[in-house]
DNA sequence: TGAATAATTTAAAACGTTTTGAATTTTGAA
DNA sequence: TTCAAAATTCAAAACGTTTTAAATTATTCA
């Protein structure tokens, strides 16, 4: 291991000058700078990060913690973001520390990581209402960026406009004459699901439509969940069946398609289906039969704004100035059609 | 931030003693030890990891690098291992650094990470024949554990017995009277696929059976890949169709099921199907219709032996002594049956 | 040529631990 | 009591950078 001192004594310079030469400080003579760089190269010098961190107080690491669950969709989505993020951060010489935790106390792994590795910032996924992780990081004054948003946020975040996602879809369906529009939403505690519920309910109300309790389902984003919920919605046990279903994801829509098929219902003749499309590979809305109408916002698009926000935060920018809300794109395909003539009456 | 020195001067001790007291050295007086610990607690002392790393030369981090691709199956599998691993490593106070890389040069991200964060060891997934990453890490003398194995390994690894996976399945099918047994295998360059190919070919030969070129497919582990390959195998364009297909994963099997259905073939009456089951959630072999016969070895089972090997390596144990090969369990369900009477003749 | 100024380099401190080798205190036996 | 041995504590060095404040050298202008 060659050190700064080695180079210094080799060239009869002081470590200070060598340090400055290598870090591109302006006050060092052009000739010496070049000489130092050449020598460092020749002696195969690699700065010791530990020493650097000790004096700078910065680790150059970004923490990312997830609850370890068995839910593939969430993991795939998470992985997409994490992969993109790690690539972008690497360009800024930042590394990602990942931790899956089974801990009941969702703050504990943050404390542990902070003690152990002192990440310079965190990326936090899937915020919930009054999220203790957010409160914790605020109280410790650790910079963080949230994927998602909740509670009138004063922190840095990237999110899609989930209210718009839900309401735009309701608008489209109403224009087609639907009035019994059901929703199979994501997990209740998650903010995106709450936002979409609000958007959905608001838009329904605006159109003068009511929503009975049984028409709004919450659950994990799996095909089976979609199947079960759709079966319950379409069985007519609790009232006339919806003429349209709004799905939280393409996986949910997949289950809805299966249920419709099993019940002998044709999409879109008997039932219109719309979903939000996170653009997870291998669950492509275009490949559905019939092709699925969606609001689309690839989840991997989150990586760039999150990485950007992290870097700006580290440069000292204020969290409030690092909030991004993306609009989702509406793509009408073949899973939506005018409501069946005999089924336009509201609930 | 309270430091060792703060505690020392508070108690009129030397930093050395305080350090030893907190790290449980035996030569420190029991009373002082307790006193120091109490005071550290009271003053909310947190050792500075950077300083610690500087003197110990260890980062306490484990690197994990993956090629960023668009293939969900690979990602889900990877994620399973990584999640389990991070949880287990955390218990040993080790953190996982993750990096997805688009770099053409697959060694480059290792060099970068080594320079930047100096992980104490790496975990390497999906080894290929003559893998340059392995050579690189060996040349730099960095400890590493491989998930998978290749080239008569002299390094630490965890792998399942892939030859056995393939051959046991061929044995079962032969016992059922099958002689035209095709295989839809994983990506050609990956060692597990090569091992399974060898096991499959050997076992076929042992049973006196030949394998025409067109009966052995390589490709990514997706349902669509399974569908396409199965269609080609079952179309009889290149010869009589197989009476049994061996699949590299449950996702492949899913595609095979779809193809059989589309061609009006019944499983297992017309076609037997077997797969290897990594136990990825939401692709459950039991839920197939008919339930899928598999060799089973949950990919998450890799976490524990990998984590263990890492720790032992860091304790100085020799890589050659840290090799684990797990046998897969054969579970016969309803997707296998005796070969159709009129189709027992070999290719 | 000399003074003033600008450009470059330096020595030393700092970051907060761990560890080495020496020094001090305590204990036990004579 | 005294001395050797054991137990405990200490001062200082080491880890390899960055940064501050001072010192040196080079340049410019009169």
Image (spheres, coloured by chain):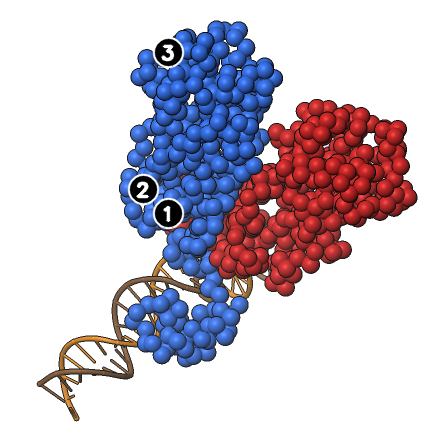
Chain colours: A red, B blue, C brown, D orange
Mark 1: secondary structure: helix
- The image quarter containing residue A282 is top right
Residue identifier under label 1: B308
Residue identifier under label 3: B210
Mark 3: secondary structure: loop
Q: Of residues B232 and B50, which is closer to you in this image?
A: B232
Q: Of residues C26 and B210, which is closer to you in this image?
A: B210
Q: Horizontal placement of A214 versus B272: left or right?
A: right
Q: Position of residue C27 (x, y in %)?
A: 23, 83
- The image quarter containing residue A265 is top right
Q: Horizontal placement of A252 versus A240: left or right?
A: left
Residue at mark 3 to residue at mark 1: CA–CA distance = 42 Å
Q: Horizontal placement of A331 versus A20: left or right?
A: right
Query: Which quadrant of the rendered structure holds the C terminus of chain A?
Result: top right
Q: Earlier in the sequence, mark 3 or mark 2?
A: 3
Q: Earlier in the sequence, mark 1 or mark 2?
A: 1
Residue at mark 1 to residue at mark 2: CA–CA distance = 9 Å
Q: Is residue B326 above or below residue B304?
A: above
Task: Report in which chain the residue with disc 1 lies.
Answer: B
Task: Report in which chain the residue with disc 3 lies.
Answer: B
């Amino acid at each position: 291991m060659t050190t700064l001192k080695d180079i210094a004594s080799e060239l009869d310079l002081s470590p200070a000058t060598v340090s400055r030469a290598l870090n591109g400080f302006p006050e060092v003579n052009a000739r010496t700078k070049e000489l130092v760089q050449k020598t460092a190269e020749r002696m195969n010098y690699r700065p010791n990060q530990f020493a650097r961190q000790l004096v700078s107080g910065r680790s150059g690491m970004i923490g990312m913690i997830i609850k370890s669950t068995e839910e593939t969709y969430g993991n795939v989505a998470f992985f997409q973001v994490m992969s993109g993020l790690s690539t972008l951060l690497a360009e800024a010489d930042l590394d990602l520390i990942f931790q899956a935790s089974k801990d009941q106390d969702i703050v504990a792994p943050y404390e542990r990581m902070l003690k152990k590795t002192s990440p310079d910032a965190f990326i936090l996924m899937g915020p919930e209402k009054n999220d203790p992780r957010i409160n914790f990081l605020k109280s410790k004054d650790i910079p963080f960026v949230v994927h998602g948003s909740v509670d009138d946020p004063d922190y840095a975040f990237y999110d899609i406009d989930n209210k718009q996602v839900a309401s735009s879809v309701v608008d489209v369906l109403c224009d087609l004459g639907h009035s019994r529009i059901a929703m199979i939403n994501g997990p209740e505690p998650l903010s995106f699901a709450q936002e979409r519920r609000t958007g959905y309910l608001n838009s329904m109300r605006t159109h003068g439509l009511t929503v009975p309790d049984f028409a709004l389902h919450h659950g994990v984003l799996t095909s089976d969940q979609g199947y079960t919920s759709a079966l319950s919605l379409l069985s007519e046990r609790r009232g006339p069946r919806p003429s349209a279903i709004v799905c939280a994801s393409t996986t949910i829509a997949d289950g809805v398609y299966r249920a419709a098929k099993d019940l002998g219902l044709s999409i879109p003749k008997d039932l219109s289906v719309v979903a939000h499309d996170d653009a997870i590979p291998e669950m492509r809305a275009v490949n559905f039969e019939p092709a699925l109408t969606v609001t689309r916002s690839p989840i991997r698009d989150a990586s760039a704004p999150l990485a950007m926000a992290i870097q700006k935060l580290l440069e000292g920018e204020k969290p409030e100035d690092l909030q991004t809300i993306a609009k989702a794109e509406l793509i009408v395909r073949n899973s939506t059609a005018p409501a069946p003539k005999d089924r336009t009456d509201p609930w």
